[in-house]
Image: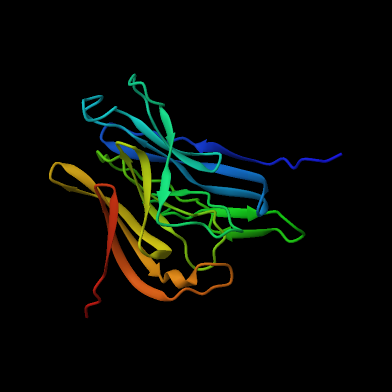
Amino acid sequence: MGGCAHGYVRTVVTVPAQAKPGEVAFGKGVTVSKGTKLGSTSADAVVVASASDPDGPTDRSEGDSVWRVRGGMLELCEWADDGRDDCRLATYEGFSAPPLLAFVPTIIEPGNIGRGSQLIAGGDNPAIVGDVAKHKTQSLPFSRERSIWVTAGALALVGAQPAFFCSATAEGPRCQALPLMVSSSLGVFGLRHNGDVSSVLWIHAAANVGVGLGALPADLGVYRCEGVKGAPSCKKAQVTQ
C-alpha cells in the first residue's frame, strides 16, 4: 500500500487594505506553508494592495481593484460584468526561483518597503529569516496601470532578492523582473506626470551572480527604477560631493 504526502499554502489577511478614491492602500497578512520544499514555514508581510479609481468604472478602467497574495500566489482582482474572471493569477517574466526554494511574494510599499519575516520550522533547528513587517503601511497615488512592486520577501536567499514591476495588461496581470537583484529596497513612491502616475522604486542593487544559499552577491550601488507601460527600467544613482 502506498501513501500520499499532503501539503498546503494558505494566506490570511491580518490587517485589511482600505483605499480612498485616488489612492492605493496596503494590508498585511501571514502565509503558512506546510509540506513544501522547505518544510513548514510562516511568512508575515504586506500581501494586499487595494486601488480605488477616482473616476470609477469607465471604458478604460473597471474601477476598484485588489492585488492580493492568496495561497502564496499573486493575483489581481477587478470586478466587472465583462465575461472575464474577476481574479486572475499574475505571470512572472525574467526570473526563475532556484529549484530548492519557494517564491512567496511580498508587496513593496513605503512603510515596510518589502520587509517581512519568515519562520522556517522544518528540521530540528527552526530559523527566522528577515525582519518583521511591523511598520505602519502608507498609501500611494492611484496608477492607471494598477502598478505595484513585488519582491520575494519569504524566499530564503542570502544577500539578494529578485524584484518585479507588476501591472494590469490586456492579457492579464504581469510581473516583469528588474534587470538587477535587490539587496534592499530603499523607497517607493508615485510620480505624477502627463495626467497619470508612474511608480518609482529606489533599490540597493546586487549582481545576479550572487543568487543562491551561501552566496555573497557583489554590491552594485544604489539604483532608481521606474515602471512605465508594464516594463521597469533602472539607472544607477550618481555619487556627488
**Foreground of the two, 5 or 41:** 5
- Quarter of the image with the N terminus in it: top right
- Quarter of the image with the C terminus in it: bottom left
- Image coordinates of residue 164 in percent, x first then y, are 39, 53
Q: Answer with left or right where residue 12 lies relative to residue 150.
A: right
- Image coordinates of residue 9 in percent, x first then y, are 61, 41
Residue 8, picture quadrant: top right
Image height of 61 relative to 111, above or below? above
Report the residue that reaches farthest toward the left: 194
**Foreground of the two, 174 or 11:** 174
Residue drawn at x 12%, y 45% is 194
Residue drawn at x 42%, y 41% is 90
Residue 120, picture quadrant: bottom right
Q: How many marks?
A: 0
- Image coordinates of residue 42 in percent, x first then y, are 62, 48
Residue 237, picture quadrant: bottom left
Q: Answer with left or right where residue 45 lies relative to residue 205.
A: right
Residue drawn at x 57%, y 60% is 156
- Image coordinates of residue 70 in percent, x first then y, are 52, 38
